[in-house]
Amino acid sequence: QVQLVESGGGLVQPGGSLRLSCAASGFTFNYYYVNWYRQAPGKERELVASVSRSGDNTNYADSVKGRFTISRDNAKNTALLQMNNLKPTDTAVYYCNAASISMGEYWGQGTQVTVSS
């Protein structure tokens, strides 16, 4: 059974940090790019960060550059999103996505991140 399970969300004050985890099972994780998306209330889902299959290449949305770091551990079938200096505008449901041009994609159920004082 294919699963992507996010964890690590929660409530944090502005300027704080959170680390999101994405645990994959049921498919060959290292065949897939991993992306983190987020969706705030009333807004479209947006791509936040991406990491290549090997983990050597990463990309970030301009809004999170310098604050967020995406990484992966293919031996553990996990991906991480380290989020520092969080802002209220980062409040959203964060989703892990594993994508392959040839094999399709999978989504996690999402984890809520709320940045508020």
Image (cartoon, helix red, strand yellow):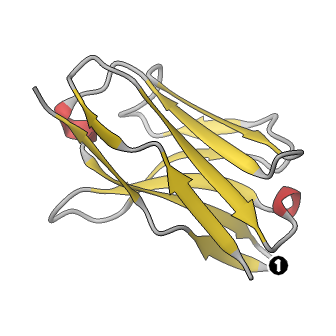
Q: Quadrant of residue 35?
A: bottom right
Please rate how many residues cluster around mark 1, counting C-alpha atoms within 10 Å: few if below 14, some from 14 to 19, many from 20: few
The picture places residue 39, in percent across and down from the top left corner, at: 31, 59
Residue beneath the point at 23% across and 56% down:
40
Locate the C terminus and report the quarter of the image it occupies: top left
The x and y percentages for residue 48 are 46, 46
Residue drawn where x is 69% and y is 67% of the image: 99
Identify residue type, mark 1: Ser
Along the horizontal axis of the image, is 70 left or right of 52?
left
Depth check: give the residue in front, 104 or 76: 76
Number of dots carrying numbers = 1
Q: Nearer the viewer, residue 99 or 19?
A: 19
Residue at 79% in and 52% down: 77
The image shows residue 2, relative to residue 12, as above or below, that is below
Q: Quadrant of the N terminus?
A: bottom right
Q: Write down the residue under mark 1.
A: 102
State which quadrant residue 84 falls in: top left
* The residue positioned farthest toward the left in the image shown: 117
Query: Where is 66 relative to 34, above or below?
Result: above
Residue 73 horizontal side relative to residue 70, left or right: right
Residue 4 at x, y percent in the picture = 63, 65
Image position, residue 116 (x, y; %): 14, 32
Query: Helix, strand, or loop for circle 1?
Result: loop
Above or below, 107 relative to 62? below
